[in-house]
Image (cartoon, rainbow, N blue to C red):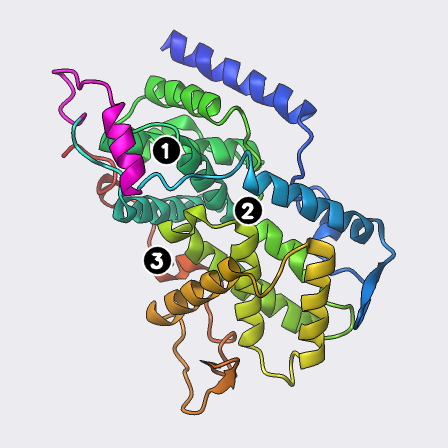
Amino acid sequence: MLRACSIHIKNVFRLRQLLSSQLVCKDKERADPEWQKPSKHLLTHRGSPPTMISDVMIDLPDRFAVMRKQESTIYRAEDYLSQATQMHQQQHRPSPSSDDSNSSTPGVNEVWREKICEWSYQVVDHFDFNREIVSISLSYLDRFLSTRPVNKKIFQLAAMTTLYLAIKLNEQGTLKMSSLIELSRGYFMVEHIAAMEEAILRALSWYVHPPTSLAFVRHLLMLIPSGSCSGIVKHELLELARFLTELAVCDYYFVTRKPSSIALAAVLNAMDGMSSSRLPEDVRQRFVESVRFVAGLDCDNAEVEECQVRLRDMYFQGGYYQNHQESPKEHDGVTYDEDFQRSSPVCVGDVHQGQPINHPQSSQYFNSH
């Protein structure tokens, strides 16, 4: 127990040092309330670059550049469930010890990752934390799993630890380790989480501020020209794009896709669901041009288009869209409804809304098999 506490204290001290010295492009919405608001100073003209007046907007191209570099390098996750990767990991897996009955049990697959993701959303909802925490936690988990093979028990422990770590680093209100242990019905102890926390931080080389899809969404929506649409429309675009990024977090398909591609796909899908009376075509075109000029992103990129299709299919097949009218509009060969956006729930957790975190529900993810 003393060693576990010592490890925990050392990690906290190391993180504080890192946070005070590491120069990364973090999402500023909590530190600066103005960062959340659409800019009032972006004047965009067809065929010409945007005129940016405010300091935030002047800084925006640099923010995009840093975030895009990060997502392609230090925060990139591998396809750790691919056959080639699994074969490589099996060849380098140490021989299981006689007292570890789970060592040869494959525990990481798409279904288990999805269940862990859903459980994580339930935890953050239960404690009233920001739902973006789950995206950060899964970034830790996916990158950690890209570095080594694990069995089911270690996978569960790693998932719990990354959630705890993401909350500790990004929320003012902290989650006590004892509360997390209670959620696992005592399946893990303090020393387990403390040791796993140290292993994860070392595997991640202490890179703990990933550029999330939602962070890209917030930046992208700032490129909508001021006064071109109502504040209500901008808010609805943000909420549907947020919802779509939360759907993407739980789908392993998006692990190897860039957060910027997921974010742009989510925003474009949200825009496609808007009628032309609410979001005029010229506004969309000016947005596309600003995305290319300011963000350095291409709306016609193959990965962006693939993400659009995947997110759209998940949205409809998941039953989130319930007011499909008989005469949907058509856009670029794809049919949408005029009220596509307005029927969307705010977040993916609405499926489980009203279900408290309790021991029986938690134990289905943290128990022996």
Mark closer to the chain start, 2 or 1: 1
- The amino acid type of the residue labelled 3 equals His
Mark seen at residue 212: 2
- The amino acid type of the residue labelled 2 equals Thr
Mark closer to the chain start, 1 or 3: 1
| Label 1 sits on residue | 145
> Mark 3 Cα within 10 Å, few/some/many (few <14, many 20+)?
few
- In the rendered image, the residue lying farthest to the right is 53
Callout in the foreground (2, 1) = 1
Question: Spatial distance from mark 1 to mark 3, Cα to Cα?
Answer: 27 Å
- Looking at this view, is 214 or 127 the one in front? 214
- Looking at this view, is 341 or 260 the one in front? 260
Dividing the image into 4 quarters, which one contains the C terminus? top left
- Image position of 190 (left or right of 26): left
Mark seen at residue 169: none
Q: Is residue 12 above or below residue 70?
A: above
> Mark 1 Cα within 10 Å, few/some/many (few <14, many 20+)?
many
Rendering quarter of residue 190: top left
| Label 3 sits on residue | 352
Query: Could you say whether the residue bearing mark 1 is in a helix, strand or loop?
Result: helix
Image location of residue 115, percent across then percent down: 30, 47
Image location of residue 128, percent across then percent down: 48, 47
Q: Point out the stretch of residues depicted in magenta.
A: 82-103
Rendering quarter of residue 112: top left
- The amino acid type of the residue labelled 1 equals Leu
Query: Could you say whether the residue bearing mark 3 is in a helix, strand or loop?
Result: helix
- In the rendered image, the residue lying farthest to the bottom is 327
**Residue drawn at the location 57% of the way across and 16% of the way down:** 13
